[in-house]
Amino acid sequence: MVDELLKKLGVSASAYQGGDHPVHTPIDGSRIAQVTLESPEAVAGKIEAAHQAYLAWRDVPAPRRGELVRLFGEVLRQYKAELGELVSIEAGKITQEGLGEVQEMIDICDFAVGLSRQLYGLTIASERPGHHMRESWHPLGVVGVISAFNFPVAVWAWNTTLALVCGNAVVWKPSEKTPLTALACQALFEQALARFGEAPEGLSQLVIGDRAAGEVLVDHPRVPLVSATGSTRMGREVGPRVAARFGRCILELGGNNAMILTPSADLDLAVRGILFAAVGTAGQRCTTLRRLLVHRSIKDEVVARVKAAYGKVRIGDPRKDNLVGPLMDKQAFQAMQDALVRARDEGGQVFGGERQLQDQFPDAWYVSPAIVEMPAQSAVVRHETFAPILYVIAYDDFEEALALNNEVPQGLSSCIFTTDIREAERFQSASGSDCGIANVNIGTSGAEIGGAFGGEKETGGGRESGSDSWKAYMRRQTNTVNYSRELPLAQGIVFD
Ligand code: NAD
């Protein structure tokens, strides 16, 4: 079945058969492909080719570059169902979320096309007569994209569409756990290139490889920008290495996202918000809700309602009518179980978290999502475990809740459910949530592409997607032009 899908998506069998790196579907753990990991030399060759492509692409007018991205959006619309299904097979997302991920790619294409006519600079008032100043934005070069398994296609599209309209070339190293969706994206992009007809060869390249291939991108002097999405562990290695050669990074790393649930909140809304944010994608989103900070006066009621909602969640094959699919692999399951043991040791009361469907899928890792009532925000709560564990902590006053929200090393997403405007505004103020995303009466996950996406502290500080994130993919140039017949110096300096 995967063969049929990949064929429809334009991926040739030689790209995913006969290699030495097995690819498994988390749905039943079976092997679905054998890809070949590319050597460091091959990666370096692709970077060089991409650099040559960039030298031509940077002079193509930006709206024309946008046309290529518009065509890519058309191709994605045509193959949304197939690519979404492949995301479900390779990453284990339920059908709706697989399709949603492809829709996100389409949305960012539309955004980038509009942007291709809006890469605005500034005019600046000069202090000298007969002079004008302006600020221009120019392409950077080759953008290296390193992505994680849990958003196997959208994160690449966020980066690539913006990078391309900004006049750059791209080399992408996807997760070694999800090479098939990457091959499909590349094949679809090549369709857009063929329709466009005049892009330089090698403009957007795919590298199938593991950490070693990523390291070539990290260290290569021809890659001025590395956009890396994944664990904080990865970012800790990548950030300093890119900085050591004065390259730039966009780091999109781990999250540990909280909801503050106040006594005035609409609890029906909040329980629905908790459910999607905490168990969606089987807890494997960077923005998954991991901490529920609930006012002590409503804690018991909320926990009872959330437990009841969890009890109705259908767990199983993500392509069937289920809400929670599998964990990615055994390692993820083990990390979840280890965290639950630690949570018990730290005084937690655990509900759920057991392995499911073991008889039907002995080689796959389905779990019931866990709720853990904790006496305090102890060490295990401060750590991101990439699995559906929701820690619940009671608070007594609002200041305490804000402090708890901010008292973790990560700073990606956060939200508050309240109908008290003072609390809502305070949460989003300078002394409120310290996260890159702070929502009111909406859960922590499921961001739209129009806003800048990313987080602070150990989340890495990067911003991608909407707003003015495009500026990270360009270099800024300040221009001063003298149209007078004099040569006055700034600051009134006389130099005769
Ligand atoms: P991971 O860190 O194991 O791998 C991510 C990518 O980095 C892979 O392509 C991997 O091959 C590569 N890599 C690992 N070490 C590297 C190194 N030293 N040099 C170069 N490349 C290296 O992450 P994962 O398990 O695939 O994904 C889950 C993690 O990603 C979670 O922590 C999650 O929160 C995070 N994530 C963050 C965001 C965000 O936008 N903030 C989005 C999705 C996922």
Image (cartoon, rainbow, N blue to C red):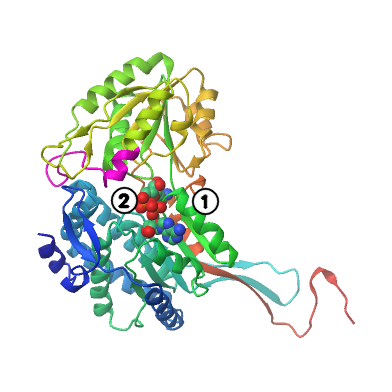
The reply to whether residue 450 is in sight is no
- The residue under the point 50% across, 50% down is 460
Q: What is the quadrant of the C terminus in the image?
A: bottom right
- The residue under the point 30% across, 69% down is 70
- Residue 197 sits in which quadrant? bottom left
**Mark 2 belongs to which amino acid?**
Asn
Extreme residue in the bottom direction = 485
Q: Residue 336 placed where, x, y %? A: 33, 36
Front-most of residues 334 and 436 = 334
- Magenta range: 317-335
Q: Secondary structure at mark 1?
A: loop
Left or right relative to 8: residue 369: right
Instruction: Using a 10 Å C-alpha cutoff, classify the residue at mark 1 as few (fewer than 14 neighbours), some (14 to 19) or many (20 or more).
Output: some
**Mark 1 belongs to which amino acid?**
Gly
The reply to whether residue 237 is in sight is yes
Q: Residue 414 placed where, x, y %? A: 44, 37
State how far apart marks 2 and 1 are (Cα): 20 Å
Extreme residue in the front direction = 20
Q: Residue 456 placed where, x, y %? A: 52, 46
Front-most of residues 316 and 187 = 316
Which residue bears the numbered disc 1? 461
Q: Main secondary structure of the magenta part?
A: loop
In terms of sequence position, does the residue under pointer 2 or pointer 1 come before the other? Answer: 2
Q: Secondary structure at mark 2?
A: loop
Front-most of residues 16 and 152 = 16
Number of numbered tags placed on the structure image: 2
Above or below 82: residue 490: below
Above or below 458: residue 61: below
Instruction: Using a 10 Å C-alpha cutoff, classify the residue at mark 2 as few (fewer than 14 neighbours), some (14 to 19) or many (20 or more).
Output: many
Which residue bears the numbered disc 2? 150
